[in-house]
Amino acid sequence: MKYVRLGNSGTIVSQVAIGTWHLPGSGKFHLDGVEMVDEAEFYKIVRKAYDAGVNFFDTANIYHGRVEKNEDHIDHIGNSERILGRSLRGYDRESIVVATKVRGPVSTFPNGEGLSRKHIMWQIRESLSRLDMDYVDLYQIHWSDPNTPHTETMRTLSHLVDLDLVRYTGESNHSAGDIEDFMNISEKYGLHPFVSMQEPYNIIQRGIEKDKLDVAKKHGLGLLAYIPLAQGVLAGKYLEAPESGSRSSYYPELITFSRRNEKIIRDLMDLAKEKGITGSQLAIAWIIKRSEMEKIPMIPLLGVTREKYLDENLAALDVRLSDDDMKRIDQLTSGLKA
C-alpha cells in the first residue's frame, strides 16, 4: 500500500479509502422498502482492506448504508456510521483514520439540518455515539448551507478541534468561491483551516478542474475523490443488463448515460483490455496519475459491495499510466454527451 499526506496536515492516509455510501446489500428489506445491509460481507471487506494496508474510512451522518430512490428516510440516518463503527471494533483506533460529515437532514424539526453552531455541536456527538469513538479524524461539511454565515460554521468547526472531538476539518460539494471564503476566514481569525475537499472526480466527471483544483493547490488541500468509477459507468456495468441491486435500480439515468455514450465507454474498456486491466482499474489508476500530474494528494473513495471488487480495485494501485495513455483518454472522452 502507498500512503499520502491528508492534504496540508501531517497525518498519513492510504492511497485509497473505503467509502460507505453504498454498502453490500442483503436482499432483505425493512418495512418501508429500504434494503438492509449485509454487515457480515462488509466486515470481510474492512478486514481485507485493513490487512492490505488501507487505513482510511469515510462515512456521513445521513448515510443509510444503501443507495435507494428516497434518501430522506429519517429513520435510517446514521446507519452507515453505526455499521462502520461496529466493523472497526477490535482494531487499534490509532491505526485508522475515520472521516464523517455533517449538514444533511436528520430530523424534521427546525435546526434538524444545516451548518449552524447548534446543529454541528449536536451532530458531532451523535456521530461519535454511532461510531462508538471518542473523536473523528476528519469532519467534513457535506454541502452548503445558505442560511448560516461561513464565520459561524468555521468558528464551530475550529472549536471542535480545540475540544479534541475532531482532529481535522474539510469541505465537500461547496463552490470554489465558498471554499476560498472559508479559508480566508480561518486565516483572518486564526482558526483551524480545512485540510481537504471531497468532490466527485473521475474520467468523465472533471468539473472540479475548472476552478476547485486551483483552490486546492493554493491552500494545500487534499482531494477525496468520490464516485471514482462514476457509480459503475466506468466499469462498464450498464452496457449490458445490470445485476440486481445495482445503483441503476434507483438511478436509471446511469443506464441512459451509458447507452448515450456507449462508444466512448467501450473504447475505454478496449484501452483497459489492451493494458491487461479492467475498466475499474483504469479509472482508479487515472485518478492516481492525475494526482501526480497536479501535485495534489488525490484519494479515490472506493464504494465496495463485494470482496472480489475490493481485490480488483486494490490491484489498480500497481497500474502505471503513461502520459500517452492520459492523452488518449482525453481524446476518447472529448465527445462525451451529458
Image (cartoon, helix red, strand yellow):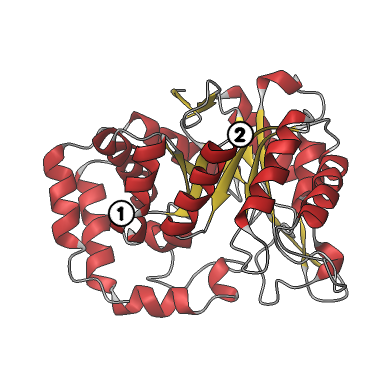
Which residue is depicted at the point 53% across and 27% down?
Answer: 13
Q: Is residue 113 visible?
A: yes
Determine whether the residue tagged by mark 2 lies in a helix, strand or loop: loop
Disc 1 designates what residue? 209
Residue 192, percent from left and from top:
61, 34
Counting from the top left corner in percent of width and height, residue 251 is at 54, 75
Question: Where is residue 159, by image quadrant?
Answer: top right
Q: Is residue 60 above or below residue 107?
A: above
Q: Which residue lies under the disc numbered 2? A: 192
- Mark 2 packing: few (<14 Cα in 10 Å), some, or many (20+)? many
Res. 233 mark: none
Sooner in the amino-acid sequence: mark 1 or mark 2: 2
Query: Where is residue 208 drawn, in percent x and y?
Result: 36, 56
Measured Cα–Cα span from mark 1 to mark 2:
26 Å
Q: Nearer the viewer, mark 1 or mark 2?
A: 2
Towards the viewer: 168 or 316: 168
The answer to whether residue 153 is left or right of residue 333 is right
Q: Secondary structure at mark 1?
A: helix
Residue 89 picture quarter: top right
Q: Residue at x 27, y 56 (%)?
A: 269
- Residue nearest the viewer, comparing 283 with 197: 197
Task: Give the quarter of the image for residue 133.
Answer: top right
Residue at x 69%, y 52% (from the top left corner): 152
Relative side of 280 to 309, left or right: left
Check disc 1: other Cα within 10 Å, few if <14, some if 14-19, many if 20+: few
Residue at 81 percent of width and 24 percent of height = 90
Can the viewer see residue 283? no
* In the rendered image, the vertical position of residue 139 relative to residue 106, given as above or below: above
Marker count (numbered):
2
User: Would residue 89 be found to the left or right of residue 318 on screen?
Assistant: right
The amino acid sitting under disc 2 is: His
Quadrant (top left/top right/bottom left/bottom right) for the C terminus: bottom left
